[in-house]
Image (cartoon, rainbow, N blue to C red):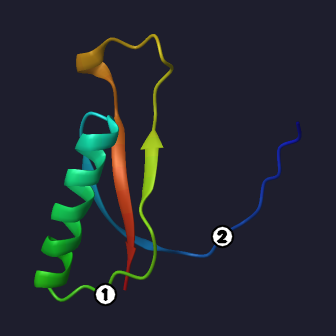
């Protein structure tokens, strides 16, 4: 396995955090998309799930974010 690091340009995302189960992520992403579109943001791609902690982190201390690219 190899790691590739590349530079990306600036991007804007609509972001919401919470528990990262499949069902919860799906629900939050749909809610976030509707909210962004209501506020006149254009969704320009698929969501990304950022899981920011190792698996042994206790439930209440985990940081997970659903990110949707916008214009």
Q: Which residue appears at 18% of the width and 89% of the height? A: 40
- Expressed as whole percent of the image width and height from the top left, the position of residue 14 reads 30, 66
- Tell me where residue 67 sits by quadrant: bottom left
Who's the residue at 32% across and 11% down the image? Answer: 58
**Residue highlighted by disc 2:** 8
Q: Within 10 Å of the Cα at label 1, are there few (<14), some (14-19), or many (20+) other Cα atoms?
A: few
* Vertical comparison of 41 with 4: above or below: below
Q: Position of residue 37 (x, y in %)?
A: 19, 82
Residue 71: mark in rendering: none
Relative to the observer, which residue lies in front, 30 or 37?
30
Q: Residue furthest right?
A: 2
Q: Earlier in the sequence, mark 1 or mark 2?
A: 2
| Residue marked by disc 1 | 42
Foreground residue among 65 and 24: 24
Query: Is residue 13 rendered to the left or right of residue 61?
Result: right
Look at the image and tell me in which quarter the C terminus lies. Answer: bottom left
Q: CA distance from mark 1 to mark 2?
A: 20 Å
Q: Is residue 54 above or below residue 2?
A: above
Q: Position of residue 23 (x, y in %)?
A: 26, 42
Around disc 2, counting alpha carbons within 10 Å, would you say few (fewer than 14), some (14 to 19), or many (20 or more)?
few
What x and y, as percent, mark residue 32?
20, 64
């Amino acid at each position: 396995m190899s790691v590739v690091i590349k530079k990306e340009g600036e991007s804007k995302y609509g972001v919401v955090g919470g528990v990262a189960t499949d069902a919860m992520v799906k629900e939050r992403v749909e809610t976030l998309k509707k909210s962004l579109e209501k506020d006149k943001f254009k969704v320009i791609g698929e969501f990304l799930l950022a899981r920011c902690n190792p698996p042994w982190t206790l439930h209440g201390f985990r940081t997970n974010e659903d990110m949707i690219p916008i214009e």
